[in-house]
Image (cartoon, coloured by chain):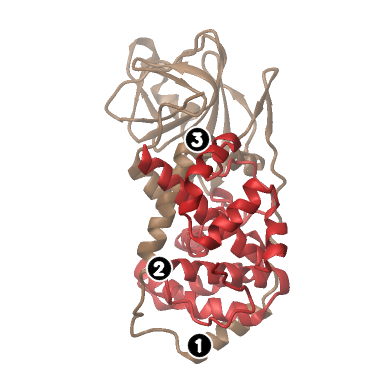
Amino acid sequence: MMIKSHPGEGLLYQYAAGDVSAAMAIVVGTHVDMCKACRRTVCDIEQKLCEDNLDTIVNVASNAMTKAQCDQMLEAIFESSVCSKLENEPNETLYLEGRCFTLPRTLAHNSHRIGEWSKLVGKLWRAPLTLDNGNQTNLIYMAPSAKVPEHTHKGQEATLVLDGVFNDERDEYRDGDFVLLDPSKTHTPETREQDCLTLATLDDPLHFTSGISRLLNPFSSLFFRA
Amino acid sequence: MQMVSGRTSTRGSMNTTQTDAAERAAELLASIAETRSRAAFSELFRHFAPKLQSYATRQFGNEQTAMDLVQETMTNVWHKAHLFKPDKGSPSTWIFTIARNIRFDLLRKNKKRKDDISADDLWPILSEQNDNLDDGYSLDNDVLMQEISQYYAQLPDAQRVVIEKIYIEGKSQQEVSDALGVPLGTIKSRTRLALKKLKELIVNDD
């Protein structure tokens, strides 16, 4: 299956350089797990970054390490013990609503960070993925024929389809598709016959824009705050 | 046929050509992984530490933090050399991605708590677990056979021999390493470079 919606090259560059938030890194990284083309692009960018930042450095600044400093650091390294940070066993399987999903590598590595599922408006479910103090990204599950009320975003929203398909006004998004939403555009995601599991991050709460759903605004942070 | 001998080579420095430097670094990483050679690590350190220091100084503008990045990066290289996959990329790119991760964590250090996500969770390059992601350079076998028969004659001798043994004689990289008396790391990096070169030849021919 072809993935048709990818992160822009600028975002892949920031990802490869480590210049993204943890939330954006996990969404882009999971897309990269799923997308061979972006994986290759990221490899090329890493190589380019390395050439620019390491390989071409010939003359070193005046503060260059002295031989004594080198020897001292070498000694410290040889005496260091292997970092005993316990690796959490990756868990690739996610069960929800009678369905079994397989998580891509980066998410599987962080499956222990996935919190409890809670039911939201309509046929939506959410589980937080806690990254660090106060920051999280969300797994959103949309059952078939679910609809998120029309909304805009104050911040940037990145959504990645992990499994299934959803539509909005502009297009249809399937497994691996990465969607970066422009804050100025309204957006009404919905599912039809199929369900959809997504990973979504946003900087600010949603802002619902139509009819009765505007009543949700005071509470929207309860639903989708990332 | 030109054959560079492996770890017993008398070539000392890494500043010949880029390819030689990459091959040398791959050999050093292999011997660090296999024999915990301090001499090999010291050579690698003297090559990379000043470059890392320069990168880190530009990133942080703080000498002490820059030295922390150098030390943490090279400590990972010392302990995790066995995780370097020569067929996936060059040694310097691998070391750069380790430094990139250390930088990400150092930038967040004052905010960081114990359970916070770390760069190694986000970019799991140093994970002990095998990943099943496709190798970006692997090509379909049948296609490879056809394409190679046209193009492999254009490869440098040292790379062509490796490609012949692996793809025509069906040997494993380890077997080729044993047969030629060349370190496994070198075989892997020659395979990678050869496949890359072949890809270029194929693409340019379209």
Q: Residue at x 48, y 77 (%)?
A: B14
Which residue type does callout 3 highlight?
Answer: Cys
B82 vs B67, left or right, is right
- Disc 3: which residue: A35
Identify residue for label 1: A69
Measure how far apart labels 1 and 3 are at the Cα level: 44 Å
Q: Amino acid at mark 1?
A: Gln
Q: Could you say whether the residue bearing mark 2 is in a helix, strand or loop?
A: helix
- Percent from the top left, x then y, of residue B39? 63, 82
Residue A219 vertical placement versus A149 (above, below): below
The numbered mark 2 sits on a residue in which chain? A
Within-10-Å neighbours for mark 1: few <14, some 14–19, many 20+ = few
| Figure quadrant of residue A205 | top left
Residue A20 in sight in this render: no
Is residue A222 at all visible to an observer of this figure? yes
Q: Which mark is residue A55?
A: 2
Q: Quadrant of the N terminus of chain B?
A: bottom right
